[in-house]
Amino acid sequence: MALRVGVIGGGQLARMMIAPAVELGLDIRVLAESEGMSAQLAATAVGDYRDLDTVRAFAKDVDVVTFDHEHVPQDVLRALVADGVAVHPGPDALQYAQDKLVMRARLAELGVPQPDWAPIANADELQAFLDDHGGRAVVKTPRGGYDGKGVRVVRAAEDAADWFAQTAEDESLLVEELVSFRRELAQQVARRPSGQITAYPVVETVQRDGVCAEVFAPAPGAAERLMRVAEGIGRQIAEGLGVTGMLAVELFETDDERVLVNELAMRPHNSGHWSQDGAVTGQFEQHLRAVSDLPLGDPTPRARWAAMVNILGGPADGAFEDRFEAAMSEHPDAKIHTYGKDARPGRKVGHVNAAGDDLDDVVYTARAAAAHFA
Amino acid sequence: MALRVGVIGGGQLARMMIAPAVELGLDIRVLAESEGMSAQLAATAVGDYRDLDTVRAFAKDVDVVTFDHEHVPQDVLRALVADGVAVHPGPDALQYAQDKLVMRARLAELGVPQPDWAPIANADELQAFLDDHGGRAVVKTPRGGYDGKGVRVVRAAEDAADWFAQTAEDESLLVEELVSFRRELAQQVARRPSGQITAYPVVETVQRDGVCAEVFAPAPGAAERLMRVAEGIGRQIAEGLGVTGMLAVELFETDDERVLVNELAMRPHNSGHWSQDGAVTGQFEQHLRAVSDLPLGDPTPRARWAAMVNILGGPADGAFEDRFEAAMSEHPDAKIHTYGKDARPGRKVGHVNAAGDDLDDVVYTARAAAAHFA
């Protein structure tokens, strides 16, 4: 019988696991939040991923449980593990992706380079951090943030007053040094439970309004040293945190040529969509292999350069298919991926990949094709 | 609403349309012959493709009807067209893939190079053909043959006696010259209803026991002239027969350097599986684009060489997943595709693709990885 991989969450990351699962011959099953989600085709259950009974019922019919997102509560995850379910990544690893304060503390123990940071319980502690860091800092809610939400640049203690007001007595916010960076990078690695790790080349990511807009792979102009340092950080974190499946490490390349860890994601990640059409093994196949404890695939790029451009918002009328004629006729080499989502300002509804020998051509193709869906 | 593509037939060709359909955002629906077929994940109906009511009910909920095989009867196809259903390829084209006598007669009209052939109604006519062709010939049943079935080499008229006995009064068998060929080739082209045609490079195919075993793309050592001639034949047949979707033209490269048409297939074809991992646009995406009358994708190879090796028969215990560890660990760059079928001697149950700069390496990888599933 085929290996049954259960994915909790029915978003586009689960959707994009369907293609490699079908080709390899894995039986992919999705627990979706509602009907009509992106991963609808593979949805075998609909329910609340925070409800233990719902998740338990889903988990009993699969060989391994993995995720479309990192929001499944620790108590639910640990109950599954206690039931003997294979959960990848497991709760011990996922806690570091779920709580940025726990993550910062652990990375500090590991000696991984990261921005100055501190837990802050009140305005006085924030002011003290501001005084030590040139009067500017980034305040983050430790939990639940994504795509720029739960992140705020502050220049005065009162800038975070509303967040402190919402923070429980025994809880803190995270404050970080506002890093002066040249650009943002992302390093992806895959790790299987039995320990094998394989790394993709470090990529450059461009965010707009806190949302990933474009990715260039490998990071243009990256020196051998930078590639090596980034890969080393990815491997160190995957091993140090016991990550299984895909790990994405978002990095700052600073003006003074340091590489600092910004965020972690323990699942396929927007920074790796290029690999679907640009690497021998795409990140979605790699994640399926890793969480199934199968040997990892070759992450080598298929072409010298690859680019990914997100389709943000989408056609106002939501009719992607009406844009296919123009986009495909002008860009026959563009690889168009859509997520079956309704258009909404700023929403990730698809992306376009391109790969080839010339970086400018590749970036132009991906941008121009994606622009047809704006 | 997403374009709804209805595929009649639930075999591996329908299965392999699922991945590109999901990525592009097409709503693929399959009419399967039974439960548990290869394309089960996308099966929205189960029934007999020869039953008009069954096919009609399936067709009314899709925007276009296409096929996993060429066996849907002409009267069913023509009824759909009369209903106003978009059927690609249509019955006028499919008749040439359904009846080899009709195909030979039409290719003769088009002046396409093919072996000497004749319709034969009895042993005397066969003997006359044998006498004219050195006492050897190939007899074929005009309808229903595939993977070598319905094809027989004969050296005497009585060798086909049983087939004549089964042939109706008003029907004939097809006899063809036994071509002395250097190797077999296949030329694939895609054509959309509005007329655009795009061609893949001609490939070399290796059959064993009448079944495709290996494919090398492009055909090694093919001269520019051969590539051009093969592409020209593919384009001429696609236009001359009004094919829509993927067309595969199986060719003999003769010892005296002619190229002769052997068989036609109007659907994705085993000779094009390499393109899933070896071309910018794989044949399954190309077929979906073509039958949906969308602009065709770039068929350019992603690498200098690609190879495809079929997994024939499969593991005796049917447990593909037990072979993944060894196959994937030894060949991380092999692209493994399985069809969700039970093992059976000689049955096509999967294939392995590999692509790269060195033909020997690519062929070795595909063969060695596929061998793990024997």
Image (cartoon, coloured by chain):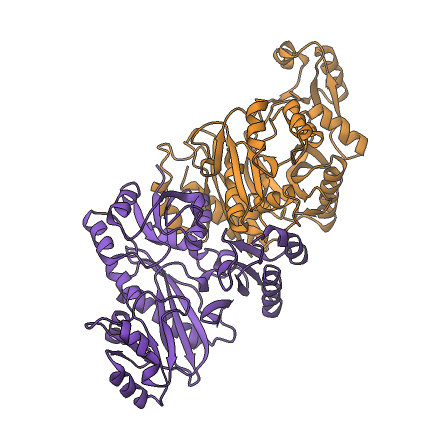
Chain colours: A orange, B purple
Is residue B293 rendered to the left or right of residue B14? left
Among the 4 quarters of the image, the one containing residue A236: top right
Q: Quadrant of the C terminus of chain A?
A: top left
Q: Is residue A83 visible?
A: yes
Seen at 33% across and 88% down, the residue is B133
Seen at 65% across and 58% down, the residue is B331
Is residue A109 rendered to the left or right of residue B163? right
Instruction: Between residue B257 and residue B27, name the one nearer to us.
Output: B27
Question: On screen, B66 above or below A371?
Answer: below
> How many badges with numbers are in the image?
0
Instruction: Between residue A125 and residue B228, name the one nearer to us.
Output: B228
Give how far across and how far down residue B350 sits, in percent.
52, 57
Give how far across and how far down residue A331 sits, in percent.
42, 51
Give how far across and how far down residue A298 sits, in percent.
64, 53
Among the 4 quarters of the image, the one containing residue B137: bottom left
Seen at 30% across and 47% down, the residue is B64
Instruction: Between residue A240 and residue B133, name the one nearer to us.
Output: B133
Seen at 24% across and 46% down, the residue is B53
Question: On screen, A343 above or below B260?
Answer: above
Is residue B312 rendered to the left or right of residue A191? left
Among the 4 quarters of the image, the one containing residue A245: top right
Q: Is residue B293 visible?
A: no
Give how far across and how far down residue A254 sits, in percent.
70, 36
